[in-house]
């Protein structure tokens, strides 16, 4: 199964303060461990939300673009890993070994990635067919 | 922590730690069987203690210390029993090593050496392929015997027997637990890669069982491949195999239709391909190529898979490059199946007449006699040349030779449409 481990933001990450050399080394070692164990598929750190934006959807279908920064620091995503593991608990065990990404309190949120079968009955042959029609159209348009 | 949570947490720790644990113990004891027993002892101790005490901060070191204590206990017991006979030599040596060495203090490269030695030992050519496969999944992949049996649709007792015999064969043949020297290296690495690819193919081939088990086996093979590449980053064939598996696995979501039927590559919905895996596969292939050594069979197959992965539509496929890659593959393997695939690629790159001429040259190839894909390929090319009657006959012939019901239906339908 695939699991995403999401590093939440902190005052420092939002202030655009880059991690110390020591932290970079520790994180580098941890990443290397993940790679060598064959579990890390991808992972990246994000720049502060001041360099981000949001597209907000109104109930009436209207779209508004809101530029960062955003205030709810500890709820923001500051980075992620995409892991391929044998069980959810394995991902939890790996993240317990992660160096604290910030010099303060913080969180790493661990979430399972949905697979086709998780969509269950909503993912009907009709939906699939619709997807395929769309794709055919997209290709024609190129 | 309740019993069930503890069990799950322990399983997770075990999956992360057990290969390294067994590898270090194998170095210390010189026997993978004893190493596995000791590791199991440590696991049993964890199952007894952790639900009460919680998972320790450094579970790997805890398991190692426990296993070592068991080893010393055992060696003492044996010592008492044998009463300082000559048999003692190895036991005493073992004890000395065990008290000196501490896994927690061991350097990283030592742990990596141990792990690589364990992989080479489990994949030793003295063992039959299926024994190597079972032993590797058990010792390196940390799968239980029951899990291996389920994945291979075999009886648990059969797999257990196979593993016991494999360990005994290694001991009897006095196979040293080490990374082979330069002279043997290439051939021994080939044996390791063969095992990993056999695991992958077992998962890839729709040979039965539940879907998730098959996907699990592929994922396990990919994990083993990635571990190997981490340990041997400069082996182009190891990188090639990883690239090949990632690229093949990237097509899994598009490979079967809603009814479970196989969808051939040109008809697959490419938007369903897994782009994370494609990216990883292309990257691994790039690393293999960057080593600047001639590509081996795995890297060449990966390079062919990469041509498909890069094409956003079937029409964008670089068939000329695929032909060149099949040339290189043919030169190494001399396999008639490779030449058959090459002829198909030539048909797509340079026109059906050229492809057909090459297929004619394979008509008397004994290895392809009765192989349904030869007439199927001929049918394809004849149809493109507008020789519909002949094409229909070839599709009918292919249908008669296929042992897959679904495929037979498709081929018969194609024959019918042309008549």
Image (cartoon, rainbow, N blue to C red):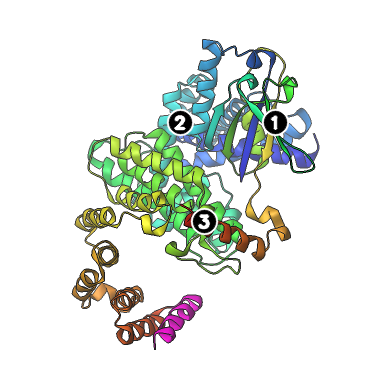
Mark 2 lies on a secondary structure that is: helix
Chain of the residue where label 2 is placed in the rendered structure: B
In the image, is residue B210 above or below residue A38?
A: below
Crowd rating for badge 1 (residues with CA inside 10 Å; few <14, some 14–19, many 20+): some
Q: Nearer the viewer, residue B188 or B313?
A: B313
Tell which circle, 2 or 3, labels the residue nearer the N-terminal end. Answer: 2
Chain of the residue where label 3 is placed in the rendered structure: B
Q: Quarter-wise, where is residue B258 in the image?
A: bottom right
Question: Does the stretch in magenta take in B404?
Answer: yes
Q: Which dot marks residue B252?
A: 3
Marks 2, 1 in one chain: no
Is residue B140 visible in this depiction of the protein?
Answer: no
Residues in magenta? B403-419
In the image, is residue B400 above or below residue B103?
A: below
Q: Could you tell me which residue is drawn at 48 percent across and 45 percent down?
A: B277
Left or right of B43 on screen, residue B341: left
Q: Position of residue A120 (x, y in %)?
A: 71, 58
Left or right of B184 on screen, residue B162: right
Chain of the residue where label 1 is placed in the rendered structure: A
Marks 3 and 1 in Cβ contact (< 8 Å): no
Q: Position of residue B174 (x, y in %)?
A: 35, 44
Question: Does the stretch in magenta take in B135?
Answer: no
Q: Which numbered disc, 2 or 1, marks the residue closer to the eye? A: 1
Q: Which dot marks residue A109?
A: 1
Q: Nearer the viewer, residue A97 or A116?
A: A116
Q: Could you tell me which residue is drawn at 56 percent across and 13 percent down?
A: A18
Mark 3 lies on a secondary structure that is: helix
């Amino acid at each position: 199964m695939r699991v995403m481990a999401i590093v939440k933001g902190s005052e420092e990450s939002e202030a655009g303060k880059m991690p110390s050399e020591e932290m970079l080394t520790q994180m580098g070692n941890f990443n290397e461990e993940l790679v060598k164990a064959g579990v890390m598929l991808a992972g990246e750190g994000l720049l502060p939300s001041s360099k981000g934006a949001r597209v907000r959807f109104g109930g009436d279908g209207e779209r508004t673009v809101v530029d960062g920064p955003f205030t709810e620091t500890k709820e923001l995503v500051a980075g992620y890993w995409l892991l391929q593991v044998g069980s959810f608990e394995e991902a939890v065990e790996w993240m317990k070994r992660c160096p604290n990404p910030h010099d303060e309190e913080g969180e790493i949120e661990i979430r399972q990635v949905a697979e086709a079968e998780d969509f269950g009955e909503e993912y009907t042959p009709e939906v699939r067919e619709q997807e395929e029609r769309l794709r055919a159209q997209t290709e024609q348009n190129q | 922590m309740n019993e069930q949570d503890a069990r799950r947490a322990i399983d997770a720790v075990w999956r992360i730690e057990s290969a390294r644990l067994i590898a270090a113990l194998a170095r210390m004891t010189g026997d993978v069987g004893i190493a596995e027993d000791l590791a199991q002892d440590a696991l049993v101790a964890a199952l007894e203690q952790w639900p009460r005490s919680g998972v320790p901060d450094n579970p790997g070191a805890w398991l190692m210390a426990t296993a070592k204590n068991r080893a010393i206990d055992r060696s003492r017991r044996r010592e008492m029993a044998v009463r300082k006979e000559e048999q003692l030599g190895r036991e005493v040596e073992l004890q000395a090593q065990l008290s000196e060495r501490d896994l927690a203090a061991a350097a990283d490269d030592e742990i990596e050496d141990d792990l690589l030695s364990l992989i080479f030992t489990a994949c030793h050519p003295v063992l039959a392929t299926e024994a190597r496969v079972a032993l590797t999944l058990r010792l390196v992949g940390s799968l239980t015997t029951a899990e291996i049996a389920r994945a291979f649709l075999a009886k648990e007792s059969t797999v257990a027997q196979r593993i016991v015999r494999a360990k005994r064969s290694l001991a009897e043949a006095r196979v040293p637990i080490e990374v082979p020297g330069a002279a043997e290296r290439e051939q021994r690495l080939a044996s390791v890669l063969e095992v990993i690819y056999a695991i992958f193919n077992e998962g890839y081939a729709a040979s039965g069982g539940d879907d998730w088990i098959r996907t699990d086996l592929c994922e396990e093979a990919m994990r083993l491949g990635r571990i190997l590449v981490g340990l041997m980053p400069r082996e182009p064939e190891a990188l090639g195999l990883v690239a090949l598996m990632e690229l093949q696995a990237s097509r899994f979501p598009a490979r079967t239709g809603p009814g479970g039927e196989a969808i051939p590559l040109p008809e697959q919905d490419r938007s369903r391909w897994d782009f994370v895996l494609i990216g990883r596969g292309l990257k691994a292939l790039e690393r293999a190529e960057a080593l600047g050594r001639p590509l081996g069979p795995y890297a060449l197959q990966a390079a062919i898979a990469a041509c498909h992965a890069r094409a956003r539509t079937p029409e964008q496929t670089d068939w000329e490059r695929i032909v060149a890659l099949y040339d290189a593959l043919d030169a190494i393997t001399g396999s008639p199946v490779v030449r058959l695939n090459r002829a198909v690629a030539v048909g797509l790159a340079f026109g059906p007449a050229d492809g057909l001429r090459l297929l004619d040259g394979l008509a008397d190839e004994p290895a392809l006699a009765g192989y349904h894909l030869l007439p199927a390929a001929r049918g394809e090319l004849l149809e493109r040349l507008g020789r519909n009657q002949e094409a229909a006959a070839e599709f009918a012939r292919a249908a008669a030779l296929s042992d897959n019901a679904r495929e037979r239906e498709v081929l018969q339908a194609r024959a019918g449409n042309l008549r």
